[in-house]
């Protein structure tokens, strides 16, 4: 970040990649959107106010989630910065990876006043690909005076050293320990308050869920009990109506009695069979019974229905009667012929 800031002050201009990386870093240390707009307007001194409002202000607001798809971007971590590949004259990325060894040592000696021994140690980390350790060593060199004042070593700082804003926070605590401690406690209080609120919501939601489950179980048991009572009542009514149907069937003709009696017996058998089955089967049988009962109640005003068996029986009786008539007429004619011969 120092390299990006140095180039911004030196040139008064920055390309998109550099503005985004450094702008999100400024957002991460607590710079608000109005402050960020004011900072970039002054930092890009080669750009007029009209051009800044037309071409650069949009990107600043976009980083804060005020433009485009309204995404609230977070500052880039070390892994993303190390893996990025800046274009020509776009001053961003990790200098410990991007610079070659000679360029890096020249930059550290001339710009940052780092001793030769420390430059060699940093160059060794770079050669071995330990870019985070090289940056950590550079942090130790830059803050050596404050570390000695607080009687601290680099190992005493609890940090993962994996984010530029982490480096800033560690440095800020060294230079402003009282303010940093107060901000840390305030932030911890806010985080604890947020965690307590979410824990309350979680407990409340679990209690509400249990309350809803208990109510649902009670309602289900009530419906199930009422359903079983209604089923028993329908069974009792069915038995009473079946006896009435049997008595009614005895007053009809023989064929109708047999048919209705068989239907009644089958209904009773179904009723007895359904005593051990589920309520859905019983309710289905109840619906069939109600429809059959309605037919039986309306059958008093109707004439008996002639089935195919009845038609066959009546046809056979007619044929039989005609045969008897023919035989009688034949016998009478034969008797008359015998009487004539005798005479």
Image: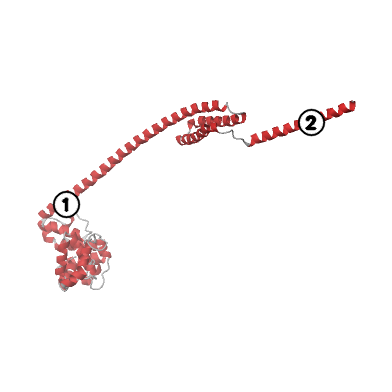
Q: Is residue 319 left or right of residue 170?
A: right
Work out whether residue 290 or residue 203 is closer to the camera in this orientation and state it. Answer: 290
Residue linked to disc 2: 329
Residue 77 picture quarter: bottom left
Circle on res. 88:
none
Instruction: Work out which quarter of the rendered image holds the C terminus and state it.
Output: top right
Q: Earlier in the sequence, mark 2 or mark 1?
A: 1
The CA distance from mark 2 to mark 1 is 126 Å
- Residue 39 visible in the displayed image: yes
Q: Is residue 20 left or right of residue 255?
A: left
Estimate the x, y position of residue 57 in percent, counting from the top left.
19, 67
Estimate the x, y position of residue 172 in percent, counting from the top left.
13, 58
Work out whether residue 291 or residue 319 is closer to the camera in this orientation and state it. Answer: 319
Residue 134 picture quarter: bottom left
How many neighbours does mark 1 have within 10 angstroms: few (below 14), some (14-19), or many (20 or more)?
Answer: few
- Residue 111 visible in the displayed image: no
Residue shown at the point (10%, 54%) measured from the top left: 178
Estimate the x, y position of residue 321 in percent, counting from the top left.
72, 31
Secondary structure beneath label 1: helix
- Is 153 placed above or below 271 here? below
């Amino acid at each position: 970040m120092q390299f990006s800031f140095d180039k911004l002050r030196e040139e008064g201009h920055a390309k998109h990649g550099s503005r985004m990386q450094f702008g999100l870093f400024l957002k991460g240390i607590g710079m608000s959107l109005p402050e960020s707009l004011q900072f970039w307007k002054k930092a890009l001194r080669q750009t007029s106010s009209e051009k800044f409002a037309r071409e650069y202000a949009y990107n600043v607001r976009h980083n804060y989630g005020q433009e485009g798809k309204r995404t609230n971007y977070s500052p880039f971590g070390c892994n993303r910065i190390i893996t990025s590949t800046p274009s020509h004259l776009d001053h961003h990325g990790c200098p410990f990876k991007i610079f070659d060894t000679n360029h890096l040592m020249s930059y550290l000696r001339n710009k940052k006043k780092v001793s030769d021994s420390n430059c060699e140690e940093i160059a060794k980390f770079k050669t071995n690909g330990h870019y985070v350790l090289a940056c950590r060593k550079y942090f130790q060199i830059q803050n050596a005076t404050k570390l000695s004042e607080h009687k601290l070593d680099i190992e005493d700082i609890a940090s993962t050293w994996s984010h530029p804003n982490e480096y800033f926070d560690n440095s800020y605590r060294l230079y402003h320990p009282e303010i940093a401690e107060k901000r840390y406690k305030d932030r911890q209080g806010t985080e604890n308050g947020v965690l307590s609120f979410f824990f309350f919501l979680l407990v409340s939601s679990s209690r509400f869920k249990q309350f809803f489950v208990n109510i649902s179980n009670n309602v289900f048991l009530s419906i199930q009990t009422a359903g079983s009572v209604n089923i028993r009542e329908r069974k009792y009514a069915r038995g009473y109506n079946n006896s009435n149907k049997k008595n009614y069937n005895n007053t009809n003709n023989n064929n109708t009695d047999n048919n209705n009696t068989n239907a009644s017996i089958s209904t009773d058998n179904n009723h007895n069979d359904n005593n051990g089955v589920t309520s859905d089967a019983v309710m289905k049988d109840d619906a069939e019974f109600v429809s059959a009962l309605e037919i039986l109640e309306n059958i008093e005003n109707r004439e008996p229905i002639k089935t195919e068996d009845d038609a066959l029986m009546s046809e056979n009786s007619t044929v039989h009667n005609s045969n008897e008539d023919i035989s009688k007429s034949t016998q009478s004619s034969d008797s008359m012929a015998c009487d004539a011969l005798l005479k």
